[in-house]
Amino acid sequence: MVTDHSYFKSQSYSRIRRQCQQSKTLFIDQEFPASLQSLQKNTNSKSSLANVEWKRPWELCSNPRLVSNSKLGITHDVIQGQLGNCWFVVGMSVLATVKNQWKQLLPDYEKQEQWNQEQGYCGLFLFRFYDFDKKIDVVIDDRLPTINGQLIYSKSRNNKEFFAPLLEKAYAKLSGCYENLEGGNLQEALIDFTGGICETLSIDPICSWDELKRKDLFSVISKAFDRGSWLTCAINVTNMHEVEQRLSCGLIKGHAYAITAIRNFKIKENPSLLARLIHIGGRTKEILQMIRLRNPWGEKEWNGPWSDNSAEWKKLTEKDRANLGLTFEEDGEFWMEFVDFCRYFNEIVQCCIMNTKTRSSFLGRSQRRWYEGRVIGKWSRPDRCGGCLNYRQTFLQNPQYIFQIQATNTTEERELLINLEQRSRRSIGQQVSNLYIGFIIMKCESNRQYRLHQLYPVLLHSSFINCRNVFARTKLTYGKYIIIPSTFDPDCIGDFQLRLYTEEINLLSPLELEYPTPHPLYSCFPCLIRGPVRYVVHLNVESADLIYSAKKPLVIHTYKPYIEVQFQNNRQQISP
């Protein structure tokens, strides 16, 4: 659970707003000036951006708005500009599909949606992003880069709405400059927008012809969409030459699309004579699984069945088309039948905001409650950056964390979600590659209090990826476990956040002590007082037999097995 927030560059929105209103001046942000250094990293080289003019929204149009219709929310018609930041633009498009989520990014929306200086307008805007376990407030002035009176970066198709370019500017400030938004990963935007966790779903090619598998996948993403998850999709590439290559069907490879709707269409068909005899009534209905996508470029759409102006739309009544809000424009948004979607697309990314409070509902649907365990850690020198399991001599020198899985019996499996996230390297204003990160899970003793010094059998081994986050989903039985997050190579340093989600309290906590410490008086009385550890006994109970009472065979007993260990005068009971 996010419990705190901070001010980027120590700039407080309320303080700056108060100062501007008192002095009756418009805010000029010295921390992100209207100059070349805010546009690109190298300000010494010749640039086509040298003739950029910075203009405020009211200089570009009359009656500008942050959001054109606050009841309907922000438009998902966001158009990518000169930057190669398709990943970020798709993130903004997806933001529009989740009801009211944009208000989390724009706190005090009503106060900020005041464009008259007498009402409080001072050219100042506040956006709130997520940084690990806290929210971070980023303030900007509303001067935007233009050439010939046109915005050069992201913009809304509605030229009076400025949510998208102002959000992009705030994120560019957080990242150091606009150029640092080039070539990112969609998951970065979703994580920073929501503080949620991202999971990648691979689309099995079998789904294109196996109706049952396709139906299961459609059900999974429909439920995720209805419960407020953010969904995107992409067609994978096999080499860099295929990036943004357009297929004959109009789709683009290596390019992120936002999923903006998932529906079942009921289509009336004229049946055959045999069908008329079987189905009295003369007409039958076919149900089609449909999905709506959006290309952030605002153009280049799917041209297959159910594309704009295709003959298939005649199968719907005018009323059904009106209910869909159907328009045939070159706006980058289009419908596809789900079977065609599975034929072309390879993966879906869903970003979920986990419910950790109480069982709640979203859009009338019940939401499951998860118990969260969250720790902030770091891989650091000299002895907490040991690399992955390939480096067995140093692997256990990584940070170690212990957690528990609770269940009614020792064989029952409980679901566990794990999300490991590294801190954004854009935030320091440098385009540095992400570390390759991952984790393993091992089962340990129920009474373990100290770090592992030898490997146990590995139950889960995640992939190691150079992305902001690595996610895994598994099921574990009752007991205690150790999770070790690591970088792939040893001696790599960086901050990370580890989150576990379980059906019961998991008590995630760090293992920091190497060994039990000797008693402080050990040096004076070495024969009487506990000294340093010399041996470790590891007990593993394979099975236990229940003994029934012959005298009371009908009495139901509740058994709580335990192990009793006695060494000299020290006796201890250990429960499994």
Image (spheres, rainbow, N blue to C red):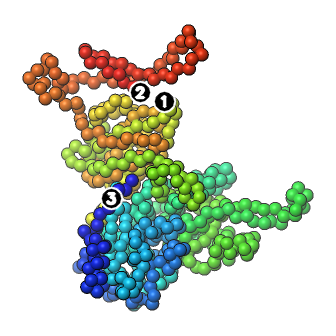
Name above or below for residue 274 compared with residue 21: above
Whichever of callouts 2 and 3 sits on the residue coming sooner in the sequence is 3
- Residue flagged by tag 3: what amino acid is it? Asp
- What residue sits right under mark 3 in the picture? 4
Q: Residue at x 25, y 85 (%)?
A: 23
**Residue 26 relative to residue 93: left or right:** left
Q: Position of residue 174 (x, y in %)?
A: 32, 69
Query: In the rendering, at what x and y percent does residue 394 appear?
Result: 27, 40
Q: Residues under labels 1 and 3: Cα distance?
A: 38 Å
Secondary structure type for disc 1: loop
> Which residue is tagged 1?
410
Tell me the quarter of the picture where residue 180 sits. bottom left
Q: Residue 483's x, y, as percent? A: 36, 41
* Mark earlier in primary sequence (2, 1): 1
State whether residue 361 appears in this view. yes
Left or right side of 511 for 265? right
Badge 3, how many Cα within 10 Å: few under 14, some, many 20+?
Answer: few
Above or below, 348 against 78 in this view is above
Give 392 or 90, whichever is nearer the viewer.
90
